[in-house]
Amino acid sequence: MQVERNLEKLAGRFDATISHKAFEDLHGLQEKESQKTPEEIKKIMGLKRKPSSSVFKEVGENGRVYPNYFAPVIVMEEGERVIKPMRYRVRPSFSDEEIPSKYNVFNARIDSLEKRKTWNSIFLQNHGLFPFIRFFEWVEVKGKKKLITFYPDDHDLMWAPMIYDTWRSESGEIEFSSFAIITNDPPKEIDEMGHDRCPIFLEETKISDWLKPEKFSKKQMYEILSSQEKTHFQHDFKVSR
């Protein structure tokens, strides 16, 4: 993903408040991490191997967000929209160990929200919105991999409904929230490029409803997710080396 790094711009666009404390808390985690050895982080986080770099990475200068990076999202707190950082890849609250990287726990298929344990406990409970500019996908064409960039031709910003969970280490010294965006079948122009999924681009009038799951039934929530912005996706691509 590529995201908008200007938090003030996001706050104005979505009528939200920036949680400076939440960003300070993330920087606090980075500070704690710097004071521990990779072996200590491995044990605290329940990792399979010692980390070779920070496990609390933030958005870079180019706005690119990869799985396990922290990115700005929008949630409801005390009746107000709040912008705060969350990790793009869910760490379930019930997990003793980090889910292996071979499993996709950063994109939640809409048809698996009630079937998969990771999603079932937070769908209809913990909802948020993930604003982003464009998304990237690898596809294979005639034996060559292509990195394709997708973006709407009539919007400078997209937003996907997401679900999130909050994990705490056994010692209580590490705590963070992490999310997965909800995806659905792709529109024709993305399918024709060889990719079979697409983030849901939620209809703008449905944002407030999605962020307040306690006010709606399960059936109504699925109806909200089916309401998407009408747009057409453009694409750019390059052949990988």
Image (spheres, helix red, strand yellow):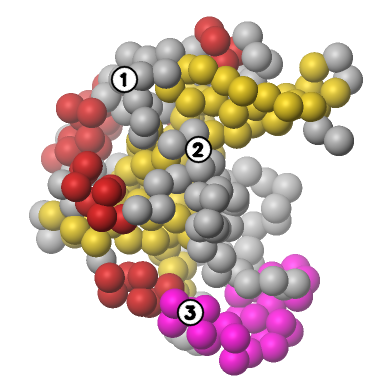
Classify residue 62 as left or right of residue 167: right
Q: Quadrant of residue 52?
A: bottom right
Instruction: Identify the element where label 3 is drawn.
Output: helix
Q: Position of residue 85 (x, y in %)?
A: 39, 61
Residue 229 shows which numbered tag? 1
Count the marks.
3
Q: Position of residue 20 (x, y in %)?
A: 27, 70
Mark 2 crowd level (few <14, some 14–19, many ≥20, 10 Å Cα) = many
Between the residue at mark 2 and the residue at mark 3, the CA separation in whole angstroms equals 26 Å
Instruction: Identify the element where label 1 is drawn.
Output: loop
Res 136 seen here: yes
Label located before the other in sequence (3 or 1):
3
Residue 36 shows which numbered tag? none
Residue sitting farthest toward the front: 61
The residue tagged 2 is 108
Label located before the other in sequence (2 or 1):
2
Contact, CB < 8 Å: mark 3 with mark 1?
no
Dominant SS of magenta comes to: helix
Label located before the other in sequence (2 or 3):
3
Q: Quadrant of residue 219?
A: top left
**What is the three-letter code of the residue carrying label 2?**
Ala
Between the residue at mark 3 and the residue at mark 1, the CA separation in whole angstroms equals 37 Å
The residue tagged 3 is 29
x 31%, y 20%: residue: 229
Instruction: Identify the element where label 2 is drawn.
Output: strand
Q: On the rendered image, what quadrant is the C terminus found in?
A: top right
**What is the three-letter code of the residue carrying label 3?**
Leu
Residue sitting farthest toward the left: 79
x 41%, y 27%: residue: 200
**What is the three-letter code of the residue carrying label 1?**
Glu
x 69%, y 88%: residue: 37
